[in-house]
Amino acid sequence: MRIQSKDLVLLLSVFAILYFFPAQAQKRFSAKLDNSINFTGIMHHLDSLANIKDPKQRKKQIDAFWAALIKKKQIPLVENDSVAFLFKGEADSVFWQGDFNGWGSLAGGHIFNNRGYRVGKSDIWRMKAAFPANARIDYKIVLNGRTWITDPANPNQQWGGSGPNSELRMPEWKPEAISQSRKEVARGQLSENVLTSSESMGYTINYKVYTPANYQQLSDLPVIYITDGQEYADEKMGAMLHVLDNLIADQVIKPVIAVFIDPREDGNVNNNRRMFELPLNDRFVHFITEELIPAVDTTYKTKASADARAIMGTSLGGLNAAYVGVKASDKINLIAIHSPSFWYRPQIYGMFEDSPTLPLKIFMSTGVISDTQEGARRMKAIMEEKKYPLEYREINEGHSWGNWRSLIDDILIYFFAAK
């Protein structure tokens, strides 16, 4: 893309302001960022500033340029499908790791060149990339090959189980309003932690139960069981309590009970047992169907039938949801699968191929940026061949809570739409 003549005139004027009037540089350049100079123009301007010979003038103007970008929230800099990741600071090397390269597992120049390069004689590092205009991507900056940090110039973050990542929002991506708390909406209640001693698993399992607003006036409620429930319920990750409250208040879905199963050991949250519980574990399926479901049906005002029960999970939880479907369709008919790690136990494909068509209704989704697209498409073909009712989604995101949160409302509507 070539710089246009009108952009060149603007760049020259901005350069003059920066060079001759440094005290006013930030204010003037900030004004020029209001859609006056395009992506290529700003990159050319940065290159020109980074090669000013006088070190003092170069630093002063680079600092003003950087402050203006931050003020206008232009880091990373995006236009259409173009991205410039930017970092300002002294370092021996700067890399960007994230959804786009599998957090390093796909690193390599032939796949994705995630190395940043110093711009001229400045202390700004840059990496250029291109993504779909409606993509949303988690990333971190890696300094000197060992120090991982969130982007200090980018206020947008997405939390995951290991803490926050910086968030690239492409121009056509929009946040889901349904996952935001609304003051006027009556809120459901989330119980205190329930500890149940599981004979199936041989240890205590924790869970919390969401009941909708006006629960005492309701009856025959459907139930959704959720693995990694502590993350689905966390407003920084799944924000599912807000989604439930809003959809129920808007009468988009029926009132629903949600059971959030926590894989972490009580009193020792660092012992997360999901890697043991979720990959095709018959004992865990037995816990859900023969221990947890009866306990919930006894305690709460549920509709105690398979067609009113759902199970949902992400990654290994998506694998588990599929396995529960094929092993216990007499107990649970509604299966929600986010970014399934089918690769971890590929025998799941044969289980669906070899079984008769079961009384299941399935929602399955995957991101397409270093996520589980290949396995999800393989399973989609099997499910379609078996003629399962299937809602299938692919979105321009990675293996992240930003991806999964955006689809929770679609799942709930698909299973529990108000009639």
Image: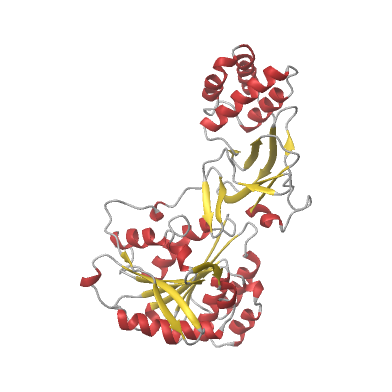
Q: Is residue 297 above or below residue 14?
A: below
Q: Quadrant of residue 43?
A: top right
Residue 76: x and y in percent read: 60, 39
Find residue 319 and report its image quarter: bottom right
How far from the left and from the top, in percent, is residue 201? 51, 83
Instruction: Please give left or right for residue 87 compared with residue 26 in the image.
Output: right
Q: Nearer the viewer, residue 227 or 397?
A: 227
Q: Is residue 357 above or below residue 207?
A: below
In which quadrant is the C terminus drawn?
A: bottom left
Q: Give the camera-side residue of 63 and 173.
A: 63
The residue furthest front is: 267
Residue 230 to residue 129: above or below: below
| Residue at x-position 68% and y-position 44% | 129
Measured as percent of width and height from the top left, residue 410 is found at 43, 63
Residue 142 pos. (x, y %): 68, 46
Please tell me which residue is depicted at 39% across the width and 81% down the height of the picture.
Answer: 307
Residue 31 at least partly seen: yes
